[in-house]
Image (cartoon, helix red, strand yellow):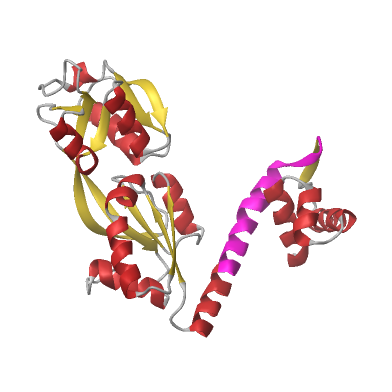
Amino acid sequence: MNLHALRIFVEVAARGSVTAAADTLTISQPAVSAQIRKLEHELGVTLVTPDGRGISLTYEGRFLYEKARRIYDWEKEIESQLEEIKEGTKGKLRLASTFLPSHYLVPKWLADYKQAHEHVEIEIRTGNSEQSIERLLRCQADLAVITNESWDDRPIRRLHLTDVLYWFIVPSSHPFAGQKISLAQLVEEPFLLREQGSSTRERLFSLCRENGVNPPRVGLQYHGLVESIQSVRAGYGVMLAPELAVREMVARGEVGRVIVPGVDINRPVYLCMREDDHNHRPVVARFLEMIVGNVYIP
């Protein structure tokens, strides 16, 4: 396969436009189009079709783009590591994290790390569990800190760091505030739910299945933890939230806690690595040592 043409195809697919890809690659539009046609002829499939002023990917094009993008993610990883070897102590630490650890655990770790390694550049990207796992597997992150209970067979090693207690919260004026309420009653109220791919959302739905009750009614859906909590604080909905995030609000009477008899939710937080990544770069190894010390990571 012509790797030069493949690189051009990835750029076209990522930008959805031959013109934009040509501008980025500083080559002419006809040259870009010629390379795409050459790649299609070589592979015997159509990869792109015209779509207004841009292009759309065919089924074969989407398949090739997903696979080829990983090749160039690896290429960037190799270039980054070689640069770090040349520079010695300088480097870049890239973390992916779900919302809970990103807001309440990781900041302290990074503050301590930067005090000891001030020249290391740090990038942290926050998302739900699925997004964080994908960033790790695509080599867009060196490590991932994830709150999750369910794991599939993707090539990930994980180390349990801690457990975090979760509470049900409601607005302070809600009649359930400070009360003991059954799960069946609670799920009749409108819930603030996280987006698809959120492990908190899945844990809540799993809890309903385990207890034989209907899933909660969706009142609002957010793509973030803090925004959801603030909506409850403002007076709307029920939410399953980490105790770390809402403990002080409950103490101040800004939101109310609902106790569900027989339901105690402790959610695990894991430090995750790619399964085949045993020789960590120096900046990653120093961060691991600070977080887990000499704990053996299988």
Q: Residue 215: tell me if it is visible.
A: no
x and y, in percent, of residue 118 in the image? 38, 73
Q: Is residue 137 left or right of residue 27?
A: left
* Magenta-highlighted residues: 52-76
Q: Split into 4 quadrants, where in the image is the C terminus?
A: bottom left
x and y, in percent, of residue 230 in the image? 32, 31
Q: Quadrant of residue 252?
A: top left
How many numbered tags mark residues here? 0
x and y, in percent, of residue 132 in the image? 42, 51
Q: Residue furthest right?
A: 30
Q: Is residue 280 left or right of residue 50?
A: left
Residue 284 lies, with reference to residue 48, above or below; the image says below
Residue 87 lies, with reference to residue 27, above or below; the image says below
Q: Is residue 225 magenta?
A: no
Q: Residue at x 34, y 34 (%)?
A: 201
Residue 8 lies, with reference to residue 91, above or below; the image says above
x and y, in percent, of residue 241 in the image? 25, 36
The one of 158 and 246 positioned closer to us in this rendering: 246
Q: Split into 4 quadrants, where in the image is the N terminus?
A: bottom right
Q: Main secondary structure of the magenta part?
A: helix
The one of 31 and 94 positioned closer to us in this rendering: 94
Q: Is residue 130 left or right of residue 185?
A: right
